[in-house]
Image (spheres, rainbow, N blue to C red):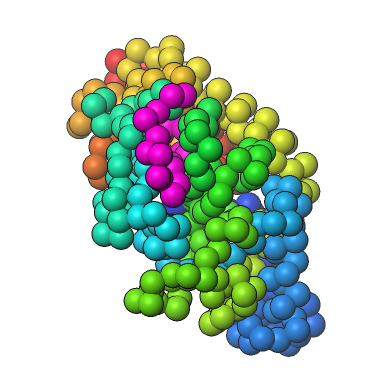
Amino acid sequence: MTQERVYNFSAGPAVLPVEVLEIARDEMLNYQGSGMSVMEMSHRSKTYDNIIKTAEKDLRDLMNIPDNYKVLFLQGGAHLQFSMVPINLMKNGVADYIVTGQWAKKAYAEAQKYGKANKIATSEDKTFSYIPDCSDLDISPDADYVYICENNTIYGTKFHTLPNTKGKVLVSDMSSCFLSEPVDVTKYGIIYAGVQKNVGPAGVQIVIIREDLIREDLPTWCPTMLKYKTHADNDSLYNTPPAYGIYICGLVFKWLKKQGGLSAMKELNEKKAKILYDFLDNSKLFKGTVEKSSRSLMNVPFVTGDEELDKKFIEEAKNNGLVQLKGHRSVGGMRASIYNAMPIEGVEKLVEFMAKFEKENA
């Protein structure tokens, strides 16, 4: 008996478009007449070269990426960028970090190994439930860059206004909001994202880097694989890339174009988020944990205020085909991740179940 597909609210690895999964299924054994799966083919072959180049072109189209930015398909997850960013960008040995959640906190700690990292703003005082005012920060005069995690997956917060970096390079970890809305790439020096939240399967990270930041004069101790130049000079093919993952990302880029691009996705994501936030704002049992001005469109944490009731809700939701609603282990409660591929019906079903649960457990 085949299990019906559930509504998967996981923060990552996360839901993918059914249409993309069906294409991957149909091409699994024989990709476009090649007689083999993408999993099996050489990354040096003409067929695969077309896959990775088409993926890059479609991503550039979706984000309007200027010609003076390189697109890199790498491995190591977003965590590897916690090291690669300071290693490659710390020319003066100084960087400023805005710490708004667990991942920014880890990136900040990692940067301290390679130079002087300054924490210039944080929302730790209220369990990362808001984004601090970043309009007039004490930016270090010799800072090589200012770093943010733009959407905080665990805590459900989002920068809706970018920080005033006072002319310094902005580096953004966009892992959980990547391709969810239009972005002006020119405002950033580096954008990076682990794709397993909103774009593809785990194992691929995408880095978009302005060419003038790709340095040759790195310390001699810097490993070859941790130099952006290594990957930029070799079009992401210095070594065997996460080939199948990139193929799936490419299918998602095509799917996004078919949906109408990032403006259309933002509109849909706003509709989905409104359904859930409106319910939370009017509920007597459930409450959101984020200040309204800082709410994420992608990750919505909420609680009942009773740990046992939270557990009961998560279990009963699972029995009703609404899965992966447990909050991150560091905060508890619940979290609904409603990425691009989550259909609006999934959010409607969740709210419908929440209303029923509230009535039964008032």
Give the quarter of the image for residue 314: top left
Q: Residue at x 20, y 31 (%)?
A: 307
Q: Which residue: 73% across, 47% down?
A: 64
Q: With respect to residue 191, does 239 lie above or below?
A: below
Q: Is residue 225 above or below residue 89?
A: below
Looking at the image, which is closer to me, 247 or 130? 130
- Residue at 47 percent across and 70 percent down: it is 217
- Residue 44 appears at what percent x and percent y? 66, 86
Q: Which residues are magenta?
A: 135-158
Residue 140 shows in this picture: yes
Rendered residue at 63%/52% (across/down): 17
The image position of residue 143, as x and y in percent, is: 40, 45
Q: Does residue 84 belong to the magenta stretch?
A: no
Residue 136 drawn in magenta: yes
The quadrant of the rendering that contains the C terminus is top left
Residue 139 quadrant: top left
Label count reads 0
Magenta part mainly helix, strand or loop?
A: loop
Q: Position of residue 243 (x, y in %)?
A: 59, 75
Q: Is residue 250 depicted above or below 106 in this figure? A: below
Between 342 and 140, the one lying in front of the other is: 140
**Is residue 82 visible to the viewer in this orientation of the structure?**
no
**Position above or below: 61 against 202:** above
140 or 206: which is nearer to us? 140
* Observer-nearest of 296 and 125: 125
Residue 269 horizontal/vertical position (percent):
61, 33
